[in-house]
Amino acid sequence: MSFVGHIRDLAAARRELETRRLLVVGGAPDADRSAFLDAVAREVADEAGLPVYRFRVADAGERSGEAGRTPGEAADAVVEACRGVFVVHPCVVVVDGVPAGAADAVPTGTADGSLLAGLISAFAESESFLLVGSTDAREGASALPSDGCADGWALLTRAAVHCDRGDPRAAGPLLRRAVEAHQVAGDRRGEAWAVFLYGRMCRLRGRAEDARRLLHIARERFRAVGERPGEAWAGGELARLATRSGAPDPDAFAEARRLHERAGDRRGAAWAHLWWTVARADEPGFPWREEFTNVQGRFHEVSDRLGTAWTLHHHALTLARTDGTDGVDGAAGTGGTGGTGERRREADRLFEGALALFEEADCPHGRAWTMLEYALRSPAHRFLNGEWAAEIRHVFHGIGDEAGEAWVDLAEAGPSPDGEPPYELACRYPTALLDTLGWTEAGEPLIPRAARDTQPEPRPGFPRPGDRDRPDGSRAHVRLTLLDDVPVPDVPARIALQVVPGPGHPWSTAPLPPLTARATSLGHAEIDPAHGVPADGAEFRFTPHRPGSHRLRFTVEDPATGTVLQQVEAEIDVVPSDPGPHRPTAPAPGPSARRA
């Protein structure tokens, strides 16, 4: 997507339009801008033999006959009018008179966002050309700015896109800058979306507690500003958190779907419908064929390729894992092989369709998982490519998904003799989820559906394979406890550090020696004091200076010998402070509890 600030060379604009199929023009007088848009449209349309359709935002309310029509309602009217024209057949569409504020991008999934975001959504799967004229855009502005531009909504859009692609690592820096931009602008709605996306990013990275806390905060902030679509999205993400335990909550997805529908958010309702269907797909007697077909139709209506791709993925997965006992294939139910073969061919077609859409949507996360499941369910496809595992690992590696690579390793190695999951999976996923891992008679893994919802990192302190020969009770652990909920910028939060010896450790029956715990902030924050004594109840005050994820390092040493006994790092998510007139005050530190 590109943006031309002022009227530039017609040929250059035409080349840009032909390359991207989208051109946004602003920063010029109305007459000049309109003439320029018309010239580009005529030149492209004449050469391609396409019709031209023109819309003006200012005319939308007049045509509706509603004198009191709001700008948002007028924008919706333009999007719906365009949707009926250029999604059906190729053409050149010119939408002029878009206010600069309405041309700002919004987070993926919002229903009442900007006009430009709505147009892009409707335009996503068409073969048409789109030209947008912005009435008062600044010279050289951009709908999707570079990292140097502090446009909060555009930064949130880019962070959401990274999460959609399955690359949450790149979302963190964008979200930090987005929070700052919304705070400067006093935009409470923008801050609520930033907190929501922080929670979503934490869910993707497998940090369940952080995600749960942030999503609850985001939902309350959405309620405070009357952002009903946001409230529904937060509820859906909280429901997805439950899937990590291997026990999804279909009722929570159904409630999120109802909230989306009440808010008029068709895209959000489609996603909630998908996750509700996925949560119930493995239930005996559930009409999964009908529901997946209905969901696919919903996504087609809102031109959401990514949603369609995940629908095809899970539809194919369900089809490949069923054995014909659902009554769909009569031959399979009577011991025949014809139905099974037809099921496999249909699943292959769905996997191939999902792969194509994931590639078009630039979603390597979905592409890698579809490649893996396709290879596992279609032996002929796998054996045609001797490097199938290496290729899938390469895609997972490209987005830093080590958990995905571990699933590929498991698929290659097969079930372990002792039935225990490999270390690389055990250290990342809850035991309850790994307990749902199954195996086919051919030795292929039936990977839990929820495994593809996250990219969890190894849990701190999880014992390495070599540690298993050493009884856990003979070790001492460092325990960190955040004593104050919801850290916010520039307000101290208390952190307690304890050294907890196991029952077989010598310190379990004797007082702790005078160890030293040294604290270091690895980001934009202060931590005081620099040293503490765990035996005296070490307590530190952590004062962050900006929202986002902050890393802290604690080093426990024996001062008598100068030996480093253990070093641990912790990440603490700091949410934007409430924009109201009263900032939280630092709680008074309680008395230190000396260890007996």
Image: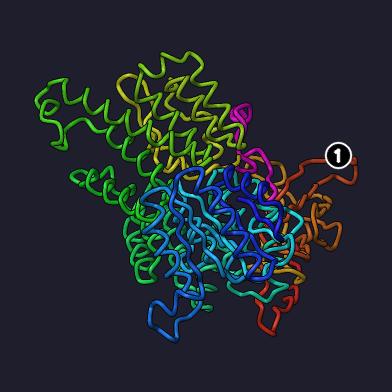
Residue 546 visible in the displayed image: yes
Is 130 positioned to the left or the right of 418 in the image? right
Q: What element carries label 1?
A: strand
Q: Is residue 434 left or right of residue 152?
A: left
Pick the front one: 216 or 17: 17
Residue highlighted by disc 1 = 563
At horizontal 44% and vertical 56% (from top left) the residue drawn is 122
Which three-letter amino acid code belongs to the residue tagged 1? Thr
Q: Nearer the viewer, residue 84 or 543?
A: 84
Residue 475 lies in the magenta-colored region: yes
The image position of residue 543, as x and y in percent, is: 78, 66
Badge 1: how crowded within 10 Å, few (<14), some, or many (20+)? few
Q: Judge whether residue 244 can be spotted in this image.
A: no
How many discs appear? 1
What x and y, as percent, mark residue 464? 62, 31
In which image quadrant can residue 474 be found?
top right
Q: Is residue 116 left or right of residue 304?
A: right
Q: In which quarter of the image is the C terminus?
A: bottom right
What residue span does the magenta drawing correspond to?
459-479
In the rendered view, how is the structure colored? rainbow
Q: Nearest the camera: 251 or 319?
A: 319
User: x%, y% of residue 218?
Assistant: 54, 67
**Residue that appears at 36% across and 59% down:** 84
Depth check, front residue: 548 or 33: 33
